Image (spheres, helix red, strand yellow):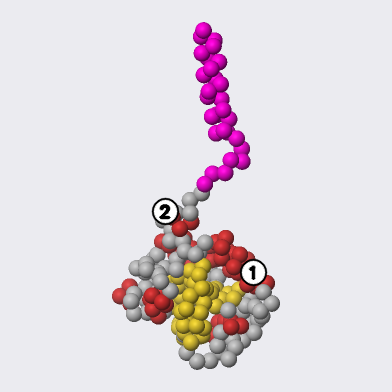
Amino acid sequence: MKQLLTAILILAIFPALARAQTPGTPTPSPSPASTAGHEYAPLQEKTINYKNWTLNDLKDNKPVDLRSLMQGKKLVMVLYFAPWCPNWRNEAPVAARLYEKYKSQGFQIIGVSEYGAREDVKNYFAPWGPPYPVVSESESRDARDKTPHYAYRQATGDTRKWGSPYNIFLDPANCTNSGDVVTEKAWVVNGELIEAEVDTFIGEHLKSPTAAITPCKN
């Protein structure tokens, strides 16, 4: 009798163990947007009316304008960040990887520092400095709702308090080369980049025949 009961028990338990140990069984992964500690957001095309700017470069504190930094590029990502923001620190290595992967193909990143002192930005990138151009738009948290960065976030539906990081993709071949507004519409990310999504977007754009290295159009 004991042997019969033991056999029945083994038969009942074995299938469950086999299912639990079967290789290749897909395990659901959490949605990027719900990952704790991150502020991932999808890439979306938005009306933004993005304007040309002249801001001081982090390296030598000399003024540089957006259009000059876009010259000769196929795709430009303007990356707004606060140096003290943990979500920016999450995205920084992702941005660096994408830049290293695609810079030789005409991809440019321009960092725009917000709500933190220039020295704090320099210290973050020390000792070698940023891998791409970085400029400073504001240096105080008191400027939060007074910057163009804030206005663009309102236009594209970013409801976060600080909006760091915030990413705008510009296509130089489809931008104006004079006047205040550089482009009416742009692809934006209201939060941290989803690396796989943005990697695909950049790669496909750089392969496009319309992504020619030309000055901004009239």
Where residue 96 sits in the image (x, y, percent)?
55, 65
Where residue 58 sits in the image (x, y, percent)?
47, 77
Query: Quadrant location of residue 197?
Result: bottom right
Q: Residues within 10 Å of mark 2 (few under 14, many from 20)?
A: few
Where residue 211 sits in the image (x, y, percent)?
65, 78
Instruction: Name the residue carrying label 2.
Output: 36
Q: Residue flagged by tag 1: what amino acid is it?
A: Glu
Query: Quadrant location of residue 143?
Result: bottom left
Magenta: main secondary structure: helix
Q: Which mark is residue 204?
A: 1
Residue drawn at the location 46% of the way across and 75% of the way down = 112
Where does the magenta region start and end?
A: 1-28
Q: Residues within 10 Å of mark 1 (few under 14, many from 20)?
A: few
**Label 2 SS:** loop
Q: Nearer the viewer, residue 216 or 117?
A: 216
Query: Quadrant location of residue 124?
Result: bottom left
**Label 1 SS:** helix
Q: Gap in Å between the C-alphas at discs 2 and 1?
A: 30 Å
Residue drawn at the location 52% of the way across and 61% of the way down = 194
Who comes first in sequence, dot 2 or dot 1? 2
- Is residue 168 in sight in this rendering? no
* Image marks 2 and 1: residues in contact by CB distance under 8 Å: no
In the displayed structure, 56 sits above or below 44; it is: below
In the displayed structure, 166 sits above or below 30; it is: below
Where residue 31 sits in the image (x, y, percent)?
48, 54
Asked whether residue 9 is drawn in magenta, I would say: yes
Residue drawn at the location 52% of the way across and 14% of the way down = 6
